[in-house]
Amino acid sequence: MAALGLALSLAFPGRALADPTKPASSEDGKYADADGNPTYNITPDGKVDWYTFSGYRRYHSECTVCHGPDGAGSSYAPALVDSLKHMNYEQFTSIVVQGRKDVNTANQKVMPTFGTNRNVMCYLDDIFVYLRARSDGALARIRPENHDPKPQSAKDAETACMGN
């Protein structure tokens, strides 16, 4: 447990970790779990962090066509809310970046590569965090209207990544 506290204090300098089981936040409003993977923060009144809200928006602009509303799946793409129950951050990232094929007599599922799509890659962590919140049952199948404001660091990262 001490190693966990040290790792999180290095990842999030200047933050006291009162409860290491809860997500730690950095000054830019991002949250990470005990393993350092991106995660969500939803307050008891339902307010979500900016990145979860951003993930909702990006998911619905890029992913919903195949994976269905709120990650619920479709006839030709799996339910991501189920997939994230057994898929870690690295696996998710690898599949989104490189794509995946599951073609046989029973399946004809092909996930295209999104490694060069800035609308996905610039917001990959956000999409993961949103889907993680849905997968964990922490976020309902509705637009999270109550959310933190967009931090300046998110604006700066977006400008740098999108090339604006």
Image: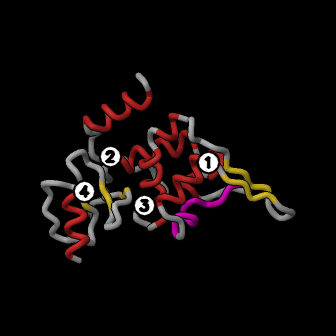
Q: Residues within 10 Å of mark 2 (few under 14, many from 20)?
A: many
Residue 55 lies within the magenta run: no
Tell me the amino acid under the disc marked 3: Ala
What's drawn in magenta, residue-wise? 76-85
Q: Amino acid under label 1?
A: Gln
Q: Residue at x 36, y 47 (%)?
A: 51
Q: Mark 2 falls on what kind of element?
A: helix
Q: Quadrant of residue 79?
A: bottom right
- Between the residue at mark 2 and the residue at mark 4, the CA separation in whole angstroms equals 19 Å
The residue carrying mark 3 is 133
Spatial CA span between label 1 and label 4: 28 Å
Q: What element does badge 4 sit on?
A: helix
Tell which circle, 3 or 1, labels the residue nearer the N-terminal end: 1
Q: Amino acid at mark 4?
A: Ala
Q: Looking at the image, is mark 2 or mark 3 earlier in the sequence? A: 2
Residue at 54% x, 70% y: name it. Answer: 86
Q: Nearer the viewer, mark 2 or mark 4?
A: 4
Q: Find the distance from the CA under tag 3 to the CA under tag 1.
A: 24 Å
Majority secondary structure of magenta residues: loop
> How far is disc 1 from disc 2 in space, using C-alphas?
27 Å
Residue under the image location 44 percent in, 67 percent down: 136
Q: Which residue in the protein does label 1 denote?
A: 98
- How far from the left and from the top, in percent, is residue 33? 33, 64
For this orientation, the residue located farthest to the top is 164
Q: How is the image coloured?
A: secondary structure
Horizontally, is 66 left or right of 92 in the view?
A: right
Residue 52 at what x, y percent from top left? 38, 50
Q: Which residue is mark 2?
A: 50
